[in-house]
Image: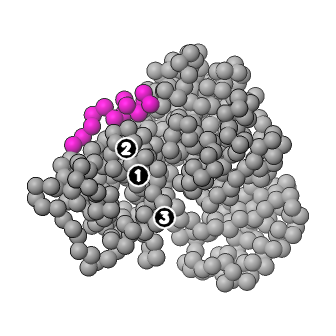
Amino acid sequence: MADRLFGTDGLRGKVNNSPMTAGMVLRLGLAAGVRFRRGQHQHRVVIGKDTRLSGYMFESALTAGLCAAGMHVIMTGPLPTPAISFLTRNMRADLGVVISASHNPFDDNGIKFFDANGYKLPDETEDEISAMVLDRDFSWPYPDARHVGRATKIEDAGGRYIVYTKSSFPAHLTLAGLRIVVDCGNGASYKVAPLALEELGAEVFRIGTSPDGTNINEHCGSLYPEVVAAKVREVRADVGLALDGDADRLVMVDERGTILDGDQLMAMCAQALMARGELPGNILVATAMSNMALEIFMQEHGGVLLRTKVGDRYVMEAMRREGAMLGGEQSGHLVFHQYSTTGDGLLAALQVLKIMCEKEKPLSELAGLLIPFPQKLINVRIKNRLPFEERPAIGDAVQKVEAALAGRGRVLLRYSGTESLCRVMVEGEHPDKVQEYAEELAAIVARELA
């Protein structure tokens, strides 16, 4: 954390351990307030959170810092990350803040920011905020007592978000007759996701909608889609949805209980958009983690896959630069730029359900477009985050595996942006070899970066 306070998706860490302490978050609120307080108009910031117990502490610390900097704070309570992005731009706020550690366990928490247009902040803006926070001698330009901020709560935030997401679903269509299992991971969507689906006519079976502050992502949600798959088979549902703790990612399950990741959902949506002429340039944006099969699929259908660094904000930056309307990550962050400025699990689910309703076909038939290459990802706990080129043994091992794959697979090594991990990914046609190569590389990485 000495070099950069922020990772690939905001600030994140163990609660009551640096940097996720109340004192640090108060300074973060001050710094964000100073950075986004401009001119003489009334400065406003929207703050949302997920269901973690520590959210209360960090909400209070952030509010204190932002108010001290002269920002008026609007608190929404537990709401999905994309809801805060929407409300920030909808309410003409200067800044949006989400208190969440996404899919991490409850004893982690984090902070991520949205600008006035609902986009995540670029690295350079995060670095400006970091510099103020980490400078213990920084002289805060406090406003006078008459111009400190005030804090209020907005009671109908969830209802506003439901109306917004439902507006992306065609008015002439209905979910009536569909049986849908939804797992909210005991997280931020525990109220809004089931209600939105029910209001569109679906019969909803709920999982992970009883948060207690410590059970977020606990054997439920998008990290455990097998839970939804089992429920789909049990109740003979038409589809299952698994959301993560802050509901910005989606994993789906078809009526047979088959789990579908972000790559498979993107292939399905890209084909539908291309068929309607609604995918500009036939461009799909994804990250380095997306399966090679997705790249081949786009090529075979007259499209192109553009890859970015891992992180949905990098996907969004590329989409804005290229004028693309669809992008996402294998993990389930799906961005439909026509409607949203960030990944939105509920909104993405509605886009898939729209295709199902329009074509009057089951999800198993529609989503069988992509057969992913076998892929193995191993997270290696490390002590030294060194450039890979400084460890020749790692480079030699990668070259050896790539030569063995002979162009029908790939190797990807990258450091986690939020944890002391190196992610080792191998992809290829033969699962046994993929497993073998991944384990070999992981052992070498563990040894070289110990």
Q: Nearer the viewer, residue 385 or 183?
A: 385
The residue segment tinted magenta is 152-164
Magenta region includes residue 216 = no
Q: Nearer the viewer, residue 311 or 238?
A: 311
Magenta region includes residue 158 = yes
- For label 2, the crowd category at 10 Å Cα-Cα, with few meaning under 14, some 14 to 19 and many 20 or more, is many
Q: CA gap, disc 3 to disc 1? A: 13 Å
Identify the residue shown where x is 51% and y is 40%.
340
Badge 2 amino acid: Thr
Image location of residue 26, percent across then percent down: 27, 63
Question: Badges 2 and 1: C-beta atoms under 8 Å apart?
Answer: yes
Report the residue that reaches farthest toward the front: 39
Q: CA gap, disc 2 to disc 3? A: 20 Å
Q: Which mark is residue 249?
A: none
Q: Classify mark 2: helix, strand or loop.
A: helix
Identify the residue shown where x is 77% and y is 58%.
427
Q: Is residue 152 left or right of residue 47?
A: left
Say whether residue 70 is visible.
yes
Residue with the mark numbered 1? 115
The earlier-in-sequence mark between 2 and 1 is 2
Residue with the mark numbered 2? 88
Identify the residue shown where x is 74% and y is 67%.
439
Image location of residue 77, percent across then percent down: 31, 42
Badge 3 amino acid: Asp
Image location of residue 63, percent across then percent down: 25, 54
- For label 3, the crowd category at 10 Å Cα-Cα, with few meaning under 14, some 14 to 19 and many 20 or more, is few
